Amino acid sequence: MGVFLMRAAAEFDNSGKSPVPIWLAGSLFIVMALGILYSFSKQVPVIKISPAGIYFKSLFRDQHIDWNEIDSVSYTGKEPLRFILRYPMEAIRMTLNSGKKVVIFYEYYSNSHLLKQFIDSHLRTAKPPLVTEDHQPSAFDMSDELFRVYKGHPFLSMRGVFIWGFFLILSVPVFRGGRIHEKSVLPLLSMFSLWYLGNGYFCHYIKISDNYLQIRNYYLPWIRRSFLLSDVTEIVIETKDKWPNCIRIITRSHRSRLYPAGTLNDSDWKELMDEFRSKGIRVRNECVY
């Protein structure tokens, strides 16, 4: 946008009109873009781990922390990511012997579970870890389980109304005048498919038995994620801007997965949290009161 405004200002200048306001607007956009780039690079640096310590590399600053400088580490919890506004995100918090706090916003790293395993292993044993993965339950494993299901109504929830209300609105030009307008079908079907997938993603529901936890989706039936409850170390009930309430599942391998569940109401969430607590799983409630 800044470059576009700068080019527009140059054209205005050639035509003899005053381009000063456009120059100022273009400069402002460029400064904001550079500021966001600097802030992101500073808060989400490249991370390398070695026997000597942890090395952070960003565009403008490098930092090295020896293992013996680290006093304590917390692998879960929210910290404010600072851009124009502060936005809370899951993070690793390291407290150094000097009292300084170092934050790693691990959701931006595709191998964050390995990062946590390496840090944890080096601090406890001074050795690289034996990489661990969560157990992957099969349908056969769960065939004799009795599941309790936590879900709302797929059609009467807000996301359901969004999906099918939009479908009805799009149907009007297709069937206008009592006949099908063939040229309207393909573009409107494409629009509805994107709308369906986008809103359907927010409609997960939860199943729990004595031994397993399963995540399913009303509108995207191919989504099926199962966990052994003994692998689950923490449950977080949270939300994001404009998102419905979500469940975050954190496991022994330090993997962290987020599932929006827009059909559940507050009473469902409270019952769900009580059930997790009854099974000895830590629950962090950040949005249901």
Image: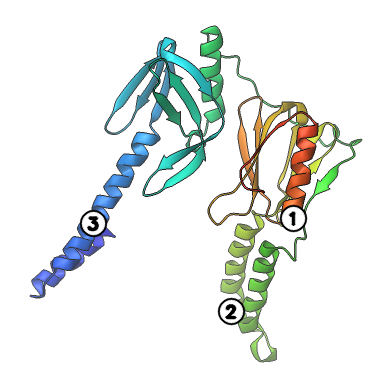
Nearer to us: label 1 or label 2: 1
- Amino acid type, mark 1: Tyr
Residue assigned mark 2: 184
Mark 1 and mark 2: Cα distance apart in space = 28 Å
Q: Quadrant of residue 220?
A: bottom right
In this figure, which colouring scheme has been used for the structure?
rainbow
User: Which badge, 1 or 2, is on the more N-terminal residue?
Assistant: 2
Q: Check disc 1 and report its element: helix, strand or loop.
A: loop
Please determine whether, in this image, residue 220 is positioned above or below residue 107.
below
Q: Residues within 10 Å of mark 2 (few under 14, many from 20)?
A: some
Numbered label tally? 3
Horizontal and vertical percent for residue 278?
Answer: 80, 33
Q: Quadrant of residue 139?
A: top right
The quarter of the image holding the N terminus is: bottom left
Q: Quadrant of residue 3?
A: bottom left
Residue assigned mark 3: 28
Look at 35% across and 19% down and name the residue there: 64
Mark 1 and mark 3: Cα distance apart in space = 45 Å
- Amino acid type, mark 3: Leu
Please determine whether, in this image, residue 100 is positioned above or below residue 81.
above
User: Which badge, 3 or 2, is on the more N-terminal residue?
Assistant: 3
Residue assigned mark 1: 218
Look at 56% across and 72% down and name the residue there: 187
Q: Check disc 2 and report its element: helix, strand or loop.
A: helix
Q: Check disc 3 and report its element: helix, strand or loop.
A: helix
Identity of the residue furthest to the front in this view: 289
Please determine whether, in this image, residue 12 is positioned above or below residue 87.
below
Please determine whether, in this image, residue 27 is positioned above or below residue 238.
below
